Amino acid sequence: MKLVVGLGNPGRKYEETRHNAGFLVLDYLAREEGLTFTSSKFNASVARGMVAGVDVLLAKPLTYMNLSGLAVAALTHWYKLNPRHDLLVISDDLDLPLGRLRVRIRGSHGGQRGLLSIIDELGTEEFSRLRLGIGRPEGNEDAKRHVLSTFDSVEEPILDEVILAAAGVVCTWLSEGAIEAMNRYNGFDARPDVELP
């Protein structure tokens, strides 16, 4: 079995915010695959089923972002999963512009508190992660306010394309592995009229 974790904050007030990019991807994927999220004893909302021919558990931690690692560690230990091979974490990323995504097989948390919590609880940076760009705030806007803001009408079509591509990353990671997901999607950019180097 594989575990795909989307990071975000529970509750209606956070549903459509930038910080909930991971939740948005899993919600889309679950709808497409006919899976339903239910509460669990692991402080997470989970949906289990077959995706891309693989038995997978989709999980949205309900611990709030900064304590995401508690739910991830509990799920990983209960199902006896090896994070290096069996775990993919989806999060937002301030350092990527909206429209871009990045797949990595290991690495630091890069200031993302949910990833930091997961690294601390698992005791390793050796797990796959998919980062969705949300861009840095403009002008003097506070970063915390920015990540908890919603997407505007110009951004929403770009977000839709990114979520679709992110679902493709998950399916590729499940069926063909992390390296293939990196090779196929790390150049992706949903912004119109942007030429990549």
Image: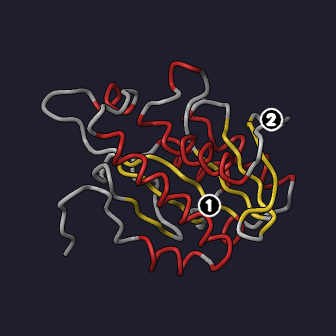
Q: CA distance from mark 1 to mark 2?
A: 20 Å
Residue visible at 77% across and 54% down in the picture? 57
Q: Which residue is mark 1?
A: 88
For label 1, count other residues whose C-alpha is less than 10 Å away and answer few (under 14), some (14-19) or many (20+): many
Q: Quadrant of the N terminus?
A: bottom right
Residue visible at 53% across and 49% down in the picture? 115
**Direction from residue 62 to residue 8 in the image, left or right:** left
Q: Which mark is residue 38?
A: 2
Which of the 4 quarters of the picture holds residue 2? bottom right
Q: Can you say whether 15 is above or below 2 in the image?
A: above
Closer to the chain start, of discs 1 and 2, is: 2
Residue visible at 50% across and 48% down in the picture? 91
For label 2, count other residues whose C-alpha is less than 10 Å away and answer few (under 14), some (14-19) or many (20+): few
> Of the residues shown, which amino acid type is indicated by label 2?
Thr
Q: Are marks 1 and 2 in contact (CB under 8 Å)?
A: no
Residue 51 screen position, x and y as percent: 73, 63
